[in-house]
Image (cartoon, rainbow, N blue to C red):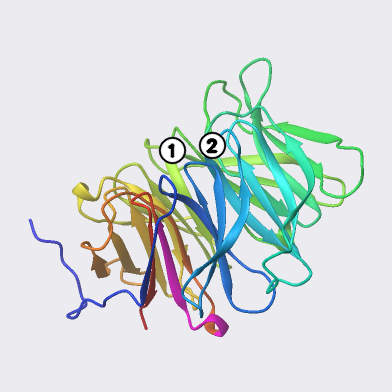
Amino acid sequence: MAEAVEAAEIPEPVFTYFGVDGGATCSCAGGKGEKRFFVGSQRGVVREYGLESKRMEGNVYIDREERRIQSLKFHKDHIFVHVRAFAVVQLKEPENVDNPLETWDIIKTFEMDHIGFCNSIIFGSKLLYVSTDEQRYSTLCCTEIAGTENHTAKARILTAPDISPMCMIIGEESENEVLIGMEDGRLAIAYGDEKQGVFDYIVTQQLGKDPIFCLASSSEWVVAGCARPPIHLVNRTDLVVQKIDYVSHAAGCSTIAFSPNNRQIIGGFFDGSIRVFSRHKLTVLLALTNFHEATISSIQWLPEEDDELVIAASSDETITLWKLK
């Protein structure tokens, strides 16, 4: 059955980067000077890329044991590298980013024991990540980035054991809200005191039965991508859930984001395809199905000051840049 798509013309990538070690696992934008972004790989390498130079600018971090880079977050002049089943490593950006002799310095290492696939996030001055307690309950952990003492506050996410978190994002920052997608299809919403480092008021909403692999949030909406169709769109005001369907052979939604104006939703899928959806009509506006051969592990739709470029990083060892407007 053919997929119903509104767009008549399929665009080509603006540029394609090749040679991501073992395939890309995550990405983030940020940094001084020229517009740049960072990509983590399956083999434990984080590299820096130039949006304007269209080249790989250098290595940021290399894990000697070649462990998967789970997530990346650029915060002020630091990058936080989450190495799966090991730690979050904090590195400081060089003073002169144009000098190839200056390197990223490791400032701090936050060790953790979680072996799942949930990412970590930076919330104000705190590092948030997930773990499991002695009774096998998943916990949300919060620790101070600065200082020498790493006191960690923990709160159970669900009232049942053996249910793993799959993804985590910041929701409404003004409300100290953190959103967590669970493997049983529940959306966990944690509220807390960022200054005190406590996120212990957690409510849940069942979106479906399949694992929630990715989340995105705007001031009015939360969108969740799962292991199978549909995509769930939650209205923040009344918590009504709408469904966005797509073809089943896309094999599930692996990464998702809102457009800068929040009118569109872009999703990357496990079969390597990319789709743009209308948030209002709940329809597919554009399907890019012939450009990546493996999972889209990370997708970003950059703001207007960055030309609203889309960065799609894939397990097929390539990264594509797109101009979709």
Distance between mark 1 and mark 2 Cα atoms: 31 Å
Q: Where the N terminus falls, by quadrant?
A: bottom left
10 Å crowding of disc 2: few (<14), some (14-19), many (20+): some
Where does label 1 land, which residue?
A: 185
Question: Mark 1: few, some, or many residues within 10 Å (few <14, many ≥20)?
Answer: many
Q: Whole-percent x and y of residue 89?
A: 71, 44
Residue at far top of view: 135
Element under disc 1: loop
Magenta-drawn segment: 305-313
Q: Amino acid at mark 1?
A: Gly
Residue 66 image label: 2
Q: Quadrant of residue 283?
A: bottom left
Image height of 206 relative to 56, above or below: above
Q: Which quadrant: the C terminus?
A: bottom left
- In terms of depth relative to the viewer, which is nearer, 56 or 33? 56
Indicate left or right for 293 with 259 as reference.
left
Instruction: Determine whether the residue tagged by mark 2 lies in a helix, strand or loop.
Output: loop
Identify which residue is drawn at 75% across, 72% down.
Answer: 96
Residue 42 location, x and y as percent?
Answer: 47, 42
Image coordinates of residue 16 in percent, x first then y, are 36, 68
* Residue ID at (51%, 78%): 53
Q: Amino acid at mark 2?
A: Glu
Examine the structure image and report whether residue 190 is included in the region drawn in magenta: no
In the image, residue 307 lies in the stretch drawn in magenta: yes
Give the residue at x 65% y 61%. 172
Q: In this image, 4 relative to 294: left or right?
A: left
Q: Looking at the image, which is closer to me, 146 or 158?
A: 146
Q: How many marks?
A: 2
